[in-house]
Structure formats: structure tokens, C-alpha cells
Amino acid sequence: MNKSRWGLGIIITISTLIILGCFYTPYDPAEIRVSERLQAPSKVHWAGTDHFGRDILSRIFVGGRISLLVGVAAVALGSSVGTLLGLWSGFKGGIWDEILMRFTDGFYALPFILLALLLATVWGPGVPVVLWAIAAGNIPIFLRLSRTQALKIKAELYVEAARALGASNLRLLWAHILPNIRSTLLVQFSASLAGAILVEASLSYLGVGIQPPQPSWGRMLREAQSYASLAPWAVWAPGLFMALTIIGFNLVGDDLIDKR
Amino acid sequence: MGRYLGQKSISFILTALVVSLVTFLILQVLPGDPARLILGTEGSPQAYARLREELRLDQPAGERYLQWLFAFGYGRWGTSLRYGLGVRELVGQALPLTLTIAVLAVGSALAAAIPAGIYIAVRPGNWGAKGLSFLVQIGMALPQFWVGILLIQFLAVRHRLLPAGGREGPLAFVLPVLTLALPRAAVLTRQVRAGTKEALTQDYVRTARAKGLPERVVLFKHAFLNGVFGVLTVAGIQLAQLFAGTIVVEQVFGLPGLGQLLLAGVFQRDLPLVQGIVMVVAVLILLLNWIHDLLLALLDPRLRYD
């Protein structure tokens, strides 16, 4: 059984739907039709309608866009900063290495959500809170990972040989160390994306993430909870999409781990 | 042992200082003028001046940080701006509920994960093990609040088997604890499986089998103890995740714990309250990690002789 093929299949399917959603949705995701409120899934509304009569499937597509965009942007930012700092720290060592390690320890005691709540107190709820909390939270993860790898590879003979041939530090990092840790970083990237989607949804559910009228998966569930006994489909549909996306990223990460 | 403990203690103190610095920088320096932030556009000049004095904003940031840090260390955690009560009293009222849920969740997650993980490691091809692995994969991916809402819908509203939150009787804790424990149990099961699997390939397990010990003894006396070790290591790192989970679960079930208090503080821009709670939580996480390191050293002689 090839796990990553399943994972990739899921990710590609959902991304395609979300990209299609940029150009076409079955209904206007923001259009309120009181006469059609709380309708069960049918041929007209595949995933039913919510308490304002808005089409849930259209809202899922549009809501997924922002979840994925914020997740990818935040993880890309956090991973590149973290990796660069980690490589440098592991390669150079010394007092800066010590200070950076203490800071990463500190961030381990501040989970993403706590960091986001701190930022939300100052900035007010919204997308920047989610973006910066996920980016900042990923820095120590990638820093630690690339630092350990850099320490290990630094001692290898081929690195020593390259250094003896007169390669500069930058060249050593770029041509010898980075290619060796690429697969490890990719695994973590996939796992971090799964985490980012989960964190974004949790924050939006708590009310400090993405704000209405912009639809988001977490926010849809927050609203659906209050009328869940009248319209259980409003809870099922966004949750299922979210869970599938996360499973997809987890599967890709898992398979890469198994291969090594 | 002494050196190991000393190292861990120093790292505990340094890390707590880093957290306090980050918290202070975000809440007190990032906004520029915290008094303006708290009052918004509505405050009168008199209220503004009073608040500036209360928060000691005329003093330089470095001095304020040190004053706050020492006051916090001596147990003076300040006064909540919205509730007018001491932050310490407020935290003291909310903490027991949060801790109860967290401890129960860790306990039940471990109770489920250890047998499940060993089973998957010992009988990997079996249908039961495959089913459990599948459940683990699902358990890690399901958003906690979604599971919570579905559990309320199914068990509390439709079938009326359990109360949906509230605090009447021990049954009220079942659903929140279940929701909180589920993802923890999934992650821990994977860890037990990996630990046991690795232990089963070790020489001492082969020796134990070769000298004819029954498989039961080999599994539980030789492989299991080493498998559990991996779990303990991860259980420590998971504390931070666990607390993040309680914030969400308290919101789902409407439980008045520390998470709800923190959220109220965030929405009302109650800086002293938020600052106090974040510090308490971070120090608690670090303290538990320190105890956890200590326990590891007691269990593993390799750590004691450095």
C-alpha cells in the first residue's frame, strides 16, 4: 500500500476543488436566502444550507481557499527562517547557538494557540494573528531539525574534504548540507501544513481567526454548533473536508518517514 | 545525577525567562501604547492618564519588565482591568477545573494507548492491528472541536446518554475528557508501537527468547518497559499541546476553566489578565517538563551517569 499516493490524491482533489472555487461556485457563498434556510442536502444544495440559507458546499470551497493559503504562506515563512537559522546555528556553534536554543525551548512552552491569543490581544482577531502565530511557531521546529542535521553532517568526511579543497562556508551549506536534509525538511513541511490547517480552524472556531463575512471552515463550525440539532449536515460537511485535507498531508509525511 | 539535574534546572529557569520576555514584548512593547490599546477610541483623557499611571507607562520598558518579573515571582500577579479582581484569585478559581480535565485526559489516553500500541507492534499483519492503525490515523487528523460537537450531537442530544458539559456529577466530565484524550491517545499509540517494535529487535529480547522464556514474559518484562520509555519522552512534549486542547474543549462544552478566562481576557484586551495566565500556563508546562526529566533520570540509569 502506497500511503503517499493516497495522500497526494486527496490533496490534489481538494486543491483542484478549491482552485475551481475561485472561478465557479454552485451558488454565491455570501448570498442570504431566508426562504431556503436550514435545508437538508438535496440535488439542489449538495451539502445543504445554513441558518442564513447560504449554500454550504460553496462556502466550503471558498473557506478552504483561505485556510490553505494562510497555512502554506505561514509554513513557508516559518520553515525558511527556521531552516536558515538552524543551519547557521548548527554550523557555527558557540554562544549564538546557545542563545537560539534557549529561545526555541521557550517557544516549545508556548503552543501555537497561546501565541496566537497573545497576538490577538494586541492586534484584535483576524488573518494576521493566524499567519504570524503559525509562522513563528514553526521557526523553532525547523530550527531544531536543521540544526541537528547540520551538526551531524558537519562531521562527515566529505564535508571535511570539501572544506580542505577550499569550499566556503556558504558553499558547504548550499551544495553539501542542504541537499542531504531536504527529505527530512519535506516531511516536516507536510506535517506542519496539516498542523497549520488544524490551528487555523481552531483559532477561527474560537473566534480569534478569520472573521466574517469571509467564510472559513472553523468559523462555519462555530456557527453550526448553535443549530446543530436542527441541521447536523452543517456540522458534518465542513468538518469532513477539513479532516480529509489534514489526513492527506499526514499521509504524505508518514510515507516519506517510512521510506527513509 | 547532580549534574544532570543542575543542567535541567538551569535550562528550566532560562526558558521561563525567555517566555516571560516574549510575553512582555508582545503585550507591552508591540502595541506602542498599551493604555490606548486597552481604552480604544472611547476613553476620556482622565481615564487615559489614570490607566497610564496604573500600568506605570511613564517608566522605560526595561524597568517595567524587571518590576513585573519580580512581582510575578513574589506572587503579585496584578489586577484584572475588567473584573477588578486579582489575577491570582481569578486563576485560582479557574485552574482546578482545567487541571482535572487535563489529568483525566492524559490518564485515559495512556490507558488506551499502551495496550493498543503493543498490540499493533506484536501483531502487525492482523486485521485488528490494521483497524487500530487506521483509527490512529483518523484520531490524529480529526479537529478536536469537531469531534466534540459531534459527540454532543450524538451522545447528548440524540441519545441522551451523557450530559453535554456542565459540572453536575462525574458523568459531565466524560465527553470533554474523551474529546481531549482522543488525539493524545492516537499520537501516543504510534509512539508505543514504534518503541515496542524497536525493543523487539534488540539483542536482549533475542537472548530472552533463546533461553526459553515464555513470550508473555519477553513481551511485558523486556520489550514493554523499553517501549513505554518512548511514550514517557513524548508525553512530556505533549503537555503544551494538551493545554492548547483544553482551551478549545472548554469552548466546545462551555466549561468555565482557564481557557475561557483567557479568551475573555483576549477579547476584552485585559492585558494584565492575559499576561498572568500565559505566564502561569507556560511556567506550569515547564515545571511539569522538569519533573518529567527528573522521572526519566530516576527510571533510566544511563541518564544518571554522565
Image (cartoon, helix red, strand yellow):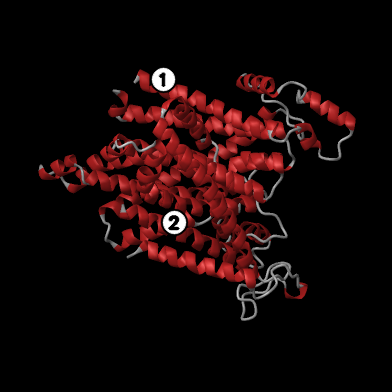
Which residue is painted at 60% across and 35% down in the image? B95
Which residue is painted at 49% across and 39% down in the image? A140
Q: In which quadrant is the N terminus of chain B drawn?
A: top left
Amino acid beneath label 2: Asn
Mark 2 chain: A
Q: Residues within 10 Å of mark 1 (few under 14, many from 20)?
A: few
According to the picture, the residue beneath numbered tag 1 turns out to be B6
Amino acid beneath label 1: Gly
Asked if residue A243 is positioned above or below residue B32 in the image, the reply reads below
Tell how many labels.
2
Specify the farthest residue to the bottom. Answer: A43
Mark 1 chain: B
CA distance separating discs 1 and 2:
38 Å
- The answer, for residue B122, to whether it is visible in the render is yes
Residue A86 sits in quarter: top left
Which residue is painted at 56% across and 45% down in the image? A135
* Residue A250's disc number: 2
Q: Secondary structure at mark 2?
A: helix
Question: Residue A145 vs residue A118: left or right?
Answer: left
**Residue A2: x, y in percent?**
34, 64
Asked if residue B169 is positioned above or below residue A14 in the image, the reply reads above
